Image (tube, helix red, strand yellow):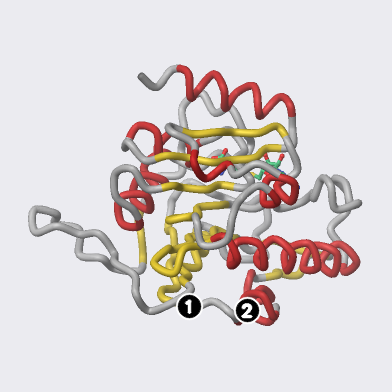
Amino acid sequence: MSDVSNCKEGLVDLTDCISLFKDIPDNSIDLVITSPPYDNIEGAGYGKGTKDVLFLKLYSEFFDEVLTEIYRVLSPTGQVFLNLKSGTINKTLVTPHWIEFLESFKKFKLKSYIIWKYSGSFDSTKARFHLDYEVIYHLSKTDDITIYHDKDDHDPLTSVWNIKHHIKDRLHPVQMPEALAEHMIKRGSKEGDLVLDPFAGSGTTLVVAKKLKRRYLGSEINPDHYANIIKRLEAVK
Ligand SMILES: C[S@@+](CC[C@H](N)C(=O)[O-])C[C@H]1O[C@@H](n2cnc3c(N)ncnc32)[C@H](O)[C@@H]1O
């Protein structure tokens, strides 16, 4: 086991996040930003397939393990932005609130419940209102946290964030817009802080962290996505 929290600039591994967590010491991460996989959990024994009740059970067990690790590695002054969205099982809406019942989740302090509101997401069904939002749980380990916000900043710190979803030249099916990652990184960390994304995807969190002079740690299990992360990080000077 080697301590990856000492990295000078950043580090990203092609691996299951559970392996990466093994190399991260307790209390060493300043900020976690992550959008976990929505419909497949590689490494948890359940691949891409029909979303059903068994999926939800395995997903929540896997998630309990991930949240336990996030809690362990988070610094007492650290923050987490956990992005989840509603989905459907058998044409019934499943909201992300199930996560609030996990024992691992209950250990955190829920500081804010944020709605990321976007336009341009139109479902093909006429039997439900459009899913034009996602949820972001803002969590911490203690009350000793700071939302960074200086006097020249006109952001009113509301809990509904209107940020465009559209991305030109998308590399990943559920890629996060850089503007969203930037908002969370600026509010949740300062230069030199260590930012973790265990489900890095196309690497948006890591790329924006590097642009904003934060250190970064990430894992991504899919080799094609991992290759994109490396390319994107190399392009940041
Ligand atoms: C919702 S996407 C993240 C998208 C990312 N925020 C972006 O901007 O591109 C989740 C990612 O987690 C990856 N993943 C799934 N299971 C994983 C695991 N056990 N460890 C690490 N990554 C995993 C998937 O391959 C997928 O790319």
Q: Work out whether 90 lies above or below 28.
A: below
Taking the spot 43% from the left edge, 56% from the top edge, the residue there is: 30
Q: Which mark is residue 47?
A: none
| Label 2–label 1 contact, CB within 8 A | yes
On the image, numbered disc 1 is attached to which residue? 110
Badge 2 residue CB within 8 Å of ligand 1: no
On the image, numbered disc 2 is attached to which residue? 100
What secondary structure is marked by label 2?
A: helix
Which of marks 1 and 2 precedes in the sequence? 2
Q: Nearer the viewer, residue 8 or 144?
A: 8
Q: Work out whether 232 lies above or below 4.
A: above
Q: Nearer the viewer, residue 235 or 171?
A: 235
Q: Nearer the viewer, residue 176 or 58?
A: 58
- Three-letter amino acid code at disc 2? Glu
Decide if residue 97 is on the left or right side of residue 18. Answer: left
Residue 236 % position (x, y): 39, 22
